[in-house]
Every structure is written in structure tokens, then in C-alpha cells.
Amino acid sequence: MSDHIKITKIDGVLTLVMNRPDKMNALTNAMYGVLADALEGSDQDSEVRAIVIRGEGASFTGGNDVGDFASGVAGPRHVTRFIRALATIAKPLVAAVQGKAVGIGTTMLLHCDLVVLAEDAELIAPFVNLALVPEAASSLLLPARIGHARAFSMFALGERVGAQDALAWGLANKVVANADLAAAAEALARRLARQPLGALIATKRLMRATGAITQRMDAESEEFAARLTSPEAQEAFLAFAQRRQPDFLQFA
Ligand code: COA
């Protein structure tokens, strides 16, 4: 268990809260494990009719813990299970995003059925900045959603996308004041929970190309694993720890 994830279940809505605000809710292997268990378990739990994911504090999440990237993870990598669960869970998933949503914080939104953004939300997918490649099938889903040019600038240059652009580009359903964010997402989830669950699940299944998505996840994982140990990536992680800019020009 990780006390960095809080879980509640009220009125048919399972709420998952990333709760490590001093580290911008950066996701550790243990946190991925708890999230994966909760998502996987939701399919079997007849009391769950909709799911909300949100983050405590000023930001949704700073993404994968960069320390874990640098040191590697001993034992099973729960991130793989978490990502797979995002792509395969039957029940609708609603995200509430404030502040920064970095890396997987942005890519997980492509698997959420409804996304509510706070006014200060910023979506950031700086995979190449860290000498890595996109994950969670985002190399497939992001260009499909917002077009190649915008997706490439997010991936390759780490361009940040503000809430209004994200809304205009089809990455979110609405933008609300920060103070209203959690309530807005819970209200949408409660509306979903009152809908006929069988039809809801079938609609989600019909709208999702699961085979193509999981196939792309496998291809990305292979590339990602190779990149993680590259000299470029080691330099990027060291630079993050040392709070300096990385020097990639030393590598051919
Ligand atoms: N892994 C580990 N720690 C992280 C983190 C991450 N992904 N994201 C944020 N944090 C930590 C910071 O190290 C800092 O901890 P400290 O106070 O002990 O030094 C704390 O969260 C607050 O972040 P800070 O960097 O001070 O906030 P900022 O507003 O100046 O910068 C970011 C925000 C997102 C630009 C910066 O935190 C960052 O680059 N994080 C890494 C994001 C990333 O590359 N994620 C992986 C994507 S694949």
C-alpha cells in the first residue's frame, strides 16, 4: 500500500486521489501499484459505476518520479499495469486537473472519458527533454486527437498547453475555476453513475480501439526501456537532480 494514494467510494463513484503534494504528486512505483489495483478492481466491484482521478495540492502530477527513472525500479514495474488498466477498464473515468500535468499526467488524460481542467491547468509531455519517448499509447492517441504538429511540439519540445488551448483542441470537456474543480468532476461522475451502466460500458467499449492501443503501448514500452538506460537519459536525470540544464551536445 502507499498512503500517497487516497481512495474513497461514495454513491457509486470511486475517487482516486494522488496525495504527495510536496513532490507535486510525482508517481512512484508503489503509487502506480495502488492505482493499478484500484482500476483493475473497479471492473469486479458492482458498487462502482464511475471513477474520478485527481491530485492533491497545487498540481495534478509532476509525472513519473524522476528519481525512480534514474535508479530503476526493483521488482515488478506497476506503471505497466496502470497504463494497461487505463486502456482496458470498463467503467467511465473522469479526470480533474489543476496546475501542472506532466508526462503521464497528460498522457493518462487521453484515456479519461471526461476531463475537467482548472483555469491554471498546464499539460506538459516533455519526453524528449528527458531523452525518453512517449508512453501510454500517446504516440498514437495525441496526434489523432490534436494533430501531428501540435502533438510533436508537445513531445519533442516540451511545449506547454494551457487550459483554454487544451479545451479548444479537444483534450478537455470544460474549464472551471480552481475552487470548483473537484466538485465539478464529482458532479459529472455522479451523473454518469446514474446512467444505465450496461449501455455506458458498451458505448465506451465501442468508442475505444483497444487492440491498436495496447499494441502501441507494447511498442512504446520496448523503446522506452531502451531509452531509460541511454547515456542521454542518464544525463537528463542527473541534471534534474542537480537542478541544472542537461548537456545533450556531448552525445552524437
Ligand atoms: N519526480 C520527482 N520529483 C518531482 C517531480 C518528478 N517527476 N516533479 C516535481 N518534483 C518535485 C521537485 O523535485 C520538487 O521537490 P523539492 O522541493 O524537494 O526540490 C517539488 O516536486 C516541487 O517541484 P519544483 O520543481 O520545485 O516546481 P516548479 O514549479 O519549479 O517546476 C516542473 C515544476 C514540473 C517544471 C519541475 O518540477 C519538473 O521538471 N519536474 C519533472 C517533470 C518530469 O520531467 N516528469 C517526468 C515526465 S516523463
Image: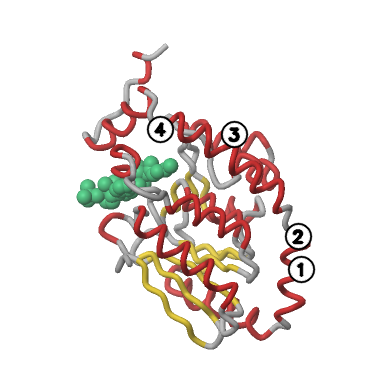
Which one is earlier in the sequence, the residue at label 3 or at label 2?
A: 3
| Spatial separation of the CA atoms under disc 3 and disc 2 | 24 Å
Query: CB of mark 2 within 8 Å of CB of mark 1?
Result: yes
Residue at x 42%, y 53% (from the top left corner)? 100
**Frontmost residue, 83 versus 58:** 83
Which one is earlier in the sequence, the residue at label 1 or at label 4?
A: 1
| Spatial separation of the CA atoms under disc 3 and disc 1 | 30 Å
Quickly name the residue at label 4.
Answer: 228
Quickly name the residue at label 1.
Answer: 203
> Callout 2, which amino acid?
Met
| Spatial separation of the CA atoms under disc 1 and disc 4 | 37 Å
Front: mark 3 or 1: 1
Image quadrant in which you'd find residue 32 = bottom left
Disc on res. 152: 3
Question: Farthest residue toward the front?
Answer: 75
Q: Position of residue 40 (x, y in %)?
A: 53, 66
Is 118 situated left or right of 66 in this image?
A: right
Element class at badge 3 = helix
Quickly name the residue at label 2.
Answer: 207
Label 3 crowd bin: few (<14), some (14–19), many (20+), radius 10 Å? some
Which one is earlier in the sequence, the residue at label 4 or at label 2?
A: 2
Q: Position of residue 131 (x, y in %)?
A: 43, 29
Element class at badge 1 = helix
Label 4 crowd bin: few (<14), some (14–19), many (20+), radius 10 Å? many
